[in-house]
Image: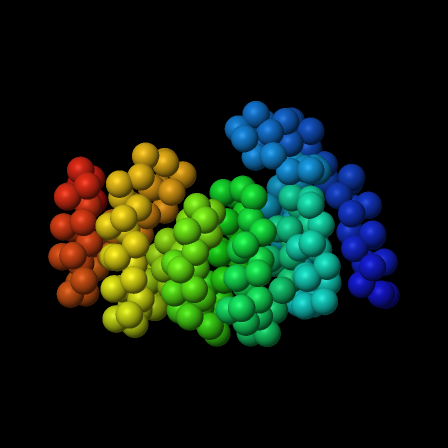
Amino acid sequence: METTEQVKQIKRSFRLYMNGVTSTSMRQKGLDYKINWGVSQMDLRHMAEQYGKNKALAVALWQEDIRECKILATLIMPADDFTASEAMEWAATLLTVEMAEMVVFNLFQHMNEAEKLSLMLFENDDKLVRICAYNLVCRLLKRNNECAPQLYATLFEKAAIDLKSADRQLLHPLVNCLDYVSSTDREQAKEAVQLLKAAGFDAF
């Protein structure tokens, strides 16, 4: 089946899983998408299993301004065939915090160039891209328990700036990331603690 037809088939199938209550709740919480069927994460994962890993289909789905299409794209994109540059193109089109979290959890953390991508994300001042950066570093640390010295240095440099922000959406992943670093036995833990205390946050 051609990619275009697969996309049409997938979009039609969302009607089977739609949840109007969930969709309305998301809209009230500020998660605005052109189309949002309110399909659950579990149902989307089941759908992804049916299609397997498919880069062409994932790219086509990501271009749709539909919540479920974008989440499905993050699930079926083969991480080992997705470059940091391609990931930056996706990150540049993010419109919600939910999608910034989903793309990191489902895709970015599994990429071969995940650390390289982290550094590239930190170079961008867009809030959602920066949220991606903090979420990604935190996921990488939890998976590998270490990162390259350059990534730690960049994390602390950007965190020192962003900790002055009053934006809770940005502060949440930032503080979570520093909290995790501070809880490890890495030498960088002390610097994470100092940053949090200087900004008025207590490390857990």
Q: Quadrant of residue 140?
A: bottom left
Q: How is the model colour-coded?
A: rainbow
Image: 117 above or below 61 = below
Q: Pinpoint residue 62: horizontal percent, then vertical percent.
A: 66, 55
Q: Residue at x 48, y 56 (%)?
A: 104
- Quadrant holding the N terminus: bottom right
* Left/right of residue 22 with respect to residue 118 in the rendered view: right
The reply, left or right, for residue 117 in relation to residue 22 is left
In this view of the protein, which residue sits in the foreground, 161 or 170? 161
In terms of depth relative to the viewer, which is nearer, 43 or 192? 192
Instruction: Give the residue at x 30% y 54%.
Output: 158
Q: How many numbered circles does the render carry?
A: 0
Quarter of image, res 198: top left
- Residue shown at the point (57%, 25%) measured from the top left: 28
Q: Determine if residue 60 is in view.
A: yes
54 to the left or right of 80: right
Q: Which quarter of the rendering shows the C terminus?
A: top left
31 relative to 192, above or below: above
Q: Position of residue 9 (x, y in %)?
A: 83, 52
* Residue for point 69% across, 29% down: 20
Q: Is residue 61 left or right of residue 184?
A: right
| Residue 79 seen from this side | no
Work out whether residue 92 or residue 28 is closer to the camera in this orientation and state it: 92
Percent of width and height locating residue 100: 50, 49
Q: Measured from the top left, where is residue 84 in percent x and y?
A: 51, 69
**Location of residue 175 with respect to 21 vertically, above or below:** below
